[in-house]
Amino acid sequence: MFRNQYDNDISTWSPQGRLHQIEYALEAVKQGSASVGLRSNTHVVLLALKRSSGELASHQQKLFRIDSHVGIAIAGLVSDARVLSNFMRTECMKSKMMYDRPIPGSRLVSLIGDKAQVNTQNYGRRPYGVGLLVGSYDEGTGPHLYECLPNANCLEYYAISIGAKSQSAKTYLEKFAKDFGEADLDALVMHGLHALRETLQQDKELNLNNCAIGIVGKDHDWELIEGDRLNGYLDRLETGASTTGATAAGDLVQGEAMDTTEL
């Protein structure tokens, strides 16, 4: 992806006012497997599509526990994600030791933004080639969902998708965004799975190996759901079953979906 003499290091501006290495880092996020996040009034759900380098290899981890009230989903370089996740865990421990309270999600995201921004202005460094979806639940302010990018932009969302073919997932999320606020946890997870399925290639399907779900919310510490525990959700996704407050992909009403499930 070499362009010209202006992309040799992060501190060199092009005549058009661009920092090419930041653009390359953002492209690394776009090339990563998709991650989806969405939140209701009580919970945040993160979902990730896991890739494998070959039939004999295990699938990469895409969801990380940071603290009991915080978890992240990633798209991009997993090695960079490990560095940032370790930094976030350290900040969470500092907050508990110094203030005897969990660190607010907004404060943690602000620290990540500051750390990422340093790498965009110092010679000899490179931006982190990973995008993060940060889900947190804070006492007093409720659930929060943030997106952190290599250019140090950190934004809060009701629902968002990053990674390869993320626009397809965003289209689904925008279509049903009005339902997320009052949705129960099961409905929120099903919406997330429908959105994640939109990012797959036509000949691929979600299965126990390539999918993972993370949940955090009110009276619900961070929980990672993968492997055999996904069976129930994937079965409902296959049959087109809907949950309370959610509409199935085929626009089936709830009663019709339940009839299908019982057959």
Image (cartoon, rainbow, N blue to C red):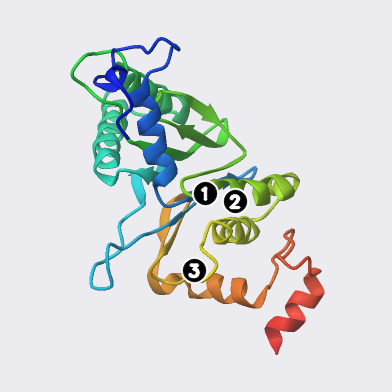
Query: Are dots 2 and 1 in contact, CB under 8 Å?
Result: yes
Q: Residues within 10 Å of mark 3 (few under 14, many from 20)?
A: some
Q: Which residue is mark 2?
A: 169
Residue 121: give x, y in percent of width and height.
Answer: 30, 13
Give x and y (percent) for residue 137: 50, 39
Give the spatial CA distance, label 1 vs label 3.
14 Å
Camera-nearest residue between 19 and 184: 19
Image mark for residue 206: 3
Query: Given the current orientation, which residue lies at the most extreme bottom position?
Result: 263
Q: Is residue 54 left or right of residue 124?
A: right
Q: Tell which circle, 2 or 3, labels the residue nearer the N-terminal end.
A: 2
Residue 164, position as x, y percentages in the image: 47, 49
Sequence-first disc among 2 and 1: 1
Assign the C terminus to one quadrant of the image. Answer: bottom right
Marks 1 & 3, CB-CB < 8 Å contact: no
Residue placed most toward the observer, 206 or 102: 206
Q: Amino acid at mark 3?
A: Leu
**What's the amino acid at mark 2?**
Ala
The secondary structure type at the circle numbered 1 is strand
Q: Mark 2 and mark 1: span between their CA atoms?
A: 8 Å
In this rendered view, identify the residue nearer to me: 60 or 18: 18
| Residue 68 visible here | no
Q: What residue is at 35 percent from the left and 60 percent from the top?
A: 51
Q: Residue at x 47, y 39 (%)?
A: 136
Residue 36 numbered tag: 1
Which badge, 1 or 3, comes first in the chain's sequence?
1
